[in-house]
Image (cartoon, coloured by chain):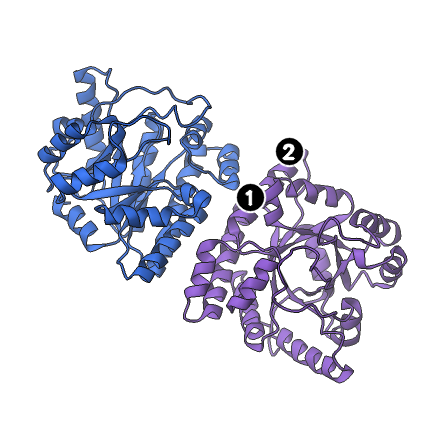
Chain colours: A blue, B purple
Amino acid sequence: MAFMSLRDKLAAGDSGILLFSLTPPKRHETEQRVKEIAAVTAQRLARLPIDGLILYDIDDESDRVAEERPFPFLPTLDPARYYADHLSAGDLPVVIYRCVGKYHDEELRDWLREADPQRVLSVFVGPSSRGKPVRTDLRAAHATHRQVRPELMLGGVVIGERHARGQDEHLRMLAKQERGCSFFVSQVVFHVNETKNLISDYFYECRARGIAPRPVIFTLSVCGSLKTLDFVQWLGVEVPRWLENSIRHASDPLVESCRQAVSIARDLADFCERLTMPYGFNVESVSIRKVEIDATVELAANVARMLGRGAVAGG
Amino acid sequence: MAFMSLRDKLAAGDSGILLFSLTPPKRHETEQRVKEIAAVTAQRLARLPIDGLILYDIDDESDRVAEERPFPFLPTLDPARYYADHLSAGDLPVVIYRCVGKYHDEELRDWLREADPQRVLSVFVGPSSRGKPVRTDLRAAHATHRQVRPELMLGGVVIGERHARGQDEHLRMLAKQERGCSFFVSQVVFHVNETKNLISDYFYECRARGIAPRPVIFTLSVCGSLKTLDFVQWLGVEVPRWLENSIRHASDPLVESCRQAVSIARDLADFCERLTMPYGFNVESVSIRKVEIDATVELAANVARMLGRGAVAGG
């Protein structure tokens, strides 16, 4: 997959994009261990017909909810640096997440100036809660992007759960579009109904305004243990009761969760196709357990097949 | 379809039952007009491979919500009488609904004593709101049934929307089961997610108690105009935002709504099959417009095909 294809596909509003998302290794890992992790990751990804990677920028979200975080928060390597040092050899384009509140405006400017817009895209993420002190807010970060590097393709985060609460996430998407976002990536989708509500409202609002809808990349994930399920819910992802039941009662929760993720993908793909809404998928592992990562790679392969994309030859 | 099959299938906890539901004609119609309506209805139904009819007992529900009723309330013929006088020739079994609050205990007793349990089943419906004055409450009606005619098969109503609010509809089902209900019929389903939540909670609660789950008959309906959509929502049925959008924006709302109903049926059938939860469908027309009734018959035929049931030969 050549780099231009991701950028071009997104720019053209094509459907069927497939991304794979990773969290960079923890900062406390040794240089040697980071190299090993990256090598294993690159090997895994080589077999997948993906258009690019997403690298997350992890922020401590413990301000967001009172309950204890099921997995401890540990700082991770800078996603852009991890990509440049360890994952850029294969020419796979990357979407670098930036939790903009972590950075001074000057830091964002420097990074935007240095980033190669032919290989790098970005998604700016706002603070995880309203009261959280930020170095740069989302609106200011968007203004900086427009001013310093508008040619670096920028995406926004969409959250179906937020639409369920406020019924205005589609307007937020349109506001982000006006501020330079040309694609969107969802939070992990377990609640198809809420996601359909959001996409439907967004699509018809675009139509009412005479604007072309921008591609939405739906994030899928496996949830192979009750602890991962707790973590996903802690992150603010709504898991329908029946889906939670089916994972809790499954003889193999990981297999059940993979099956459900493919079924969610199929449902969303059908829905978007019928609506003529451009869409794609991002497959993410929220766990660090090897068995769940393997299942995530398998899920990506299944979604690729569903999208009619073959495996990478000789990968 | 012989009568025993509905009763036997329900008793055995079989899946794949198909019912068709009607509201009896208005009481103000002439005897001649009622005959015509019944003849047309019987002709329509003869083509459908259904296990039985449902005849509703219509109560004025204007106490339930403050908003004005989109269609006026007009009293209808007694469902048992309408069936006996006009629809019993074809040997098709019937599920007679009884809004028990309308009747004195003595009236219910008389009817139960007279009803032929080989041809007639019943569903008792409680009052549409808490404050409503009743002649007989649901619990008392269940006791009367147990005392007078336990062999007449009795069903209960299930409402996914109520489960979404109180998370206890599955416990209500189990309580009704203890009071003599051996099957359930849902309110019209437009919100698959809420229905799955209910069925999942019910299924696993049965398993925890070591009880066999009883069949749930899911009611499907077309919604071919915005006025019908308003009426459905007035009745307390939740229509997901995306589904409402798709009907509002469809070039032919009736065609779109049929397509959605079949898709809901397929989703629920897959879900129940995988869970090993016994299920069936009831196809209902909430409108009196001919074009919507025709579409409802077409929907029943589609659901029959989905269930692997052929058309009635020479019907």
For the question of whether residue A114 can be seen, the reply is yes
Left or right of residue A60: residue B227:
right
Q: Residue at x 60, y 59 (%)?
A: B234
Mark 1: amino acid: Asn
In this rendering, the answer to whether A282 lies above or below B114 is above
Residue B72: x %, y % from top left: 66, 69
Q: Residue at x 85, y 54 (%)?
A: B149
- Find residue B22 and report its horizontal and vertical position in percent: 67, 68
> Numbered disc 2: what chain?
B
Q: Distance between the residues labelled 1 and 2?
A: 16 Å
Q: Quadrant of the N terminus of chain A?
A: top left
Camera-nearest label, 1 or 2: 1
The circle on residue B197 is 1
Q: Where is residue A197 in the image (x, y as percent from the top left)?
A: 42, 51
Is residue A273 or residue A132 the one in the foreground?
A132
Q: Tag 1: Cα neighbours inside 10 Å, few (<14), some, or many (≥20)?
A: many
Q: Quadrant of residue B168?
A: top right
Image coordinates for residue A264, horizontal then vertical, percent: 40, 46
Left or right: A97, with B157 as reference point: left
Chain letter behind tag 1: B
User: Between A51 and B241, which is closer to the camera in this rendering?
Assistant: B241
First along the sequence among labels 1 and 2: 1
SS assignment at label 1: helix
Q: Mark 2 points at which residue?
A: B208
Image point 55% across, 43% down: which residue? B197
Report whether residue B304 is seen: no
Does B13 sit above or below residue B209? Answer: below
Residue B252 is marked as none
